[in-house]
Image (cartoon, rainbow, N blue to C red):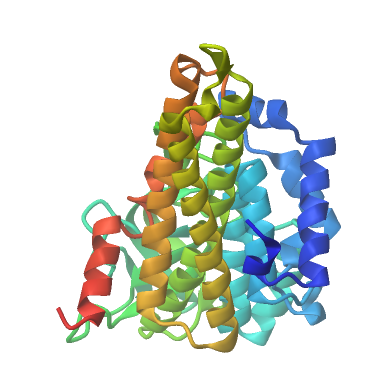
C-alpha cells in the first residue's frame, strides 16, 4: 500500500522502522514460533519496548511517556502485529487498558503512581469485563463491588480475561449499585492480580497461545478506594471510552497481522512452481492475492481514519463498529485464502499461515462479535 494512505509523519516513520529493525535483528520468525509453540509470553521483546520508551507512546511526557498522538499508537501496534500479534496484544493492553484509561480518567495520584511504570514496562494491565452470563450484553454484569470503610469488596466471576498471567493489575468492571437502567451502577476498579481471594484458571484455546486467557474468580477481594478508576456508579462512559480505544488497538494489530499473512502467501506464490511456472501466474491464485491486498489496504486506511477521528474527538460508535467489523473479517479472510494458496504446506505447523488462521478466528468473536457490530451499524441507520 502506498504510504500516502497512512499520512506518514517523520515520527511515525521512525517508529515504524525501529520496530521493523527490532524484529529483523532480535525477534525473528523463529522466536515467534518458539513462543507460540511453548505457550510462552514474549517477555524479552516487551521489556525491550519498555526500555525504548514505546510503551509510553501515548502517555504525557510529564509521566515519562512519548506524548504521541493516537496515530502513533496505531502505527506501533500495526508493526507489532505484523511481527508478532500476541506481542502487539500485550502492548495494546498496557497502552490501552493501562495508559489510555488512566491518563483519560484517572486522578492525579493515579497518574503519578501508574503511568511512569507503564511507560517503561515495569507495570502491565489487563481487562476483565465478560462474564459467563454476560458477553455481548455488557451492562448485564453481576460481579459486585460492595462498599467498605477502605474501599470495595469484589465478588463474582469473569471469563476470557486475556493476558492475566503477564499483568500486575486487572481493570475490572463491576456493579456497585442497581439503577433504573442496566448501565447505571457500574464502577471500574484497578485490582492487583496478586490480591488475596482472586484466583485464575487458564483456558485452552484455539489460538493466541503465548498470552493465553483465563477464568477469574473474586472471593471477597479487597480493593482500596484509591484504585477506583472514574466515578462510582457512573463508570459506563468510562467503559465505553476504553472499549472505543480498544477497537482501534485491536484493529491496528490485526491489520498488521493480515499484512504479514498476505506477504507470506505472496512470497510462496512467487516461488512455488507448478506446470512450469510460479503458481502466482495462474488467475485462480493471483485473484486471491489481489483480493487479499484489497482487504489489507482498506483495513489500514480504516485504522488510520479512526485514529484521526479519536485524536480530533469526531469519532462515533458507528465508526468504531465499522472498523472492528471490517478489519476482523478481513484478517480472517486473508488468513483463510493465504492458507489455501499454500495448500498442504499451509496445513502444517511449519508454516505461519496456520497460526494466522487460528488467531484470526478470535477477531470476529471477542471484544464484540461481528453480529453485534452489524446491529450497531444498523441501529445508526434507523433500523
**Which quadrant holds residue 35?**
top right
**Image height check: is 275 above or below 286?**
above
Does 197 sit left or right of 99 as displayed?
Answer: left
Q: Position of residue 22 (x, y in %)?
A: 81, 44
**Image height check: is 208 above or below 314?**
above
Does 248 sit left or right of 112 as displayed?
Answer: left
Nearer to the camera, 116 or 12: 12
Asked if residue 141 shows in the view, the reply is: no
Does 182 sit left or right of 146 as displayed?
Answer: left
Q: Residue at x 76, y 67 (%)?
A: 12
Nearer to the camera, 338 or 241: 338
Nearer to the camera, 122 or 75: 75
Q: Residue at x 60, y 82 (%)?
A: 311
Nearer to the camera, 219 or 37: 37
Q: Residue at x 66, y 32 (%)?
A: 32
The quarter in which the C terminus is drawn is bottom left
Outermost left residue: 383
Q: Position of residue 136 (x, y in %)?
A: 26, 61
The quarter in which the N terminus is drawn is bottom right
Amino acid at each position: 500500500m502506498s504510504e500516502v494512505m497512512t499520512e506518514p509523519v517523520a515520527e511515525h516513520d521512525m517508529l515504524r522502522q525501529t520496530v521493523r529493525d527490532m524484529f529483523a535483528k532480535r525477534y525473528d520468525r523463529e522466536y515467534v514460533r518458539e513462543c507460540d509453540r511453548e505457550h510462552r509470553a514474549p517477555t524479552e521483546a516487551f521489556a525491550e519496548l519498555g526500555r525504548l520508551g514505546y510503551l509510553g507512546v501515548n502517555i504525557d511526557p510529564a509521566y515519562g511517556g512519548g506524548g504521541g498522538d493516537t496515530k502513533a499508537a496505531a502505527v506501533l501496534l500495526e508493526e507489532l502485529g505484523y511481527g508478532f500479534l500476541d506481542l502487539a496484544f500485550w502492548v495494546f493492553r498496557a497502552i490501552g487498558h493501562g495508559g489510555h484509561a488512566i491518563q483519560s480518567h484517572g486522578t492525579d495520584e493515579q497518574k503519578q503512581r501508574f503511568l511512569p511504570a507503564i511507560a517503561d514496562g515495569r507495570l502491565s494491565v489487563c481487562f476483565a469485563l465478560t462474564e459467563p452470563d454476560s458477553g455481548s450484553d455488557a451492562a448485564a454484569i453481576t460481579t459486585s463491588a460492595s462498599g467498605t470503610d477502605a474501599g470495595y469488596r469484589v465478588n463474582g466471576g469473569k471469563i476470557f480475561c486475556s493476558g492475566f498471567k503477564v499483568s500486575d493489575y486487572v481493570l475490572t468492571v463491576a456493579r456497585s449499585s442497581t439503577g433504573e437502567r442496566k448501565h447505571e451502577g457500574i464502577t471500574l476498579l484497578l485490582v492487583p492480580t496478586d490480591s488475596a481471594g482472586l484466583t485464575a484458571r487458564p483456558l485452552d484455546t484455539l489460538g493466541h497461545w503465548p498470552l493465553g486467557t483465563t477464568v477469574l474468580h473474586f472471593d471477597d477481594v479487597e480493593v482500596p478506594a484509591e484504585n477506583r478508576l472514574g466515578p462510582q456508579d457512573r463508570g459506563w462512559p468510562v467503559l465505553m471510552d476504553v472499549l472505543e480505544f480498544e477497537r482501534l488497538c485491536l484493529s491496528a494489530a490485526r491489520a498488521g497481522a493480515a499484512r504479514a499473512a498476505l506477504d507470506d502467501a505472496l512470497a510462496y506464490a512467487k516461488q512455488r512452481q507448478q506446470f512450469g511456472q510460479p503458481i502466482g501466474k495462474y488467475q485462480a491464485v493471483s485473484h486471491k492475492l489481489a483480493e487479499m491486498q484489497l482487504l489489507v489496504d482498506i483495513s489500514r486506511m480504516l485504522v488510520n481514519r479512526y485514529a484521526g477521528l479519536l485524536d480530533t474527538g469526531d469519532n462515533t460508535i458507528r465508526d468504531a463498529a465499522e472498523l472492528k467489523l471490517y478489519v476482523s473479517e478481513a484478517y480472517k479472510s486473508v488468513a483463510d485464502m493465504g492458507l489455501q494458496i499454500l495448500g498442504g504446506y499451509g496445513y502444517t505447523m511449519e508454516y505461519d499461515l496456520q497460526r494466522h488462521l487460528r488467531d484470526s478466528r478470535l477477531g470476529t468473536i471477542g471484544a464484540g462479535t461481528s453480529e453485534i457490530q452489524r446491529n450497531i451499524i444498523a441501529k445508526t441507520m434507523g433500523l
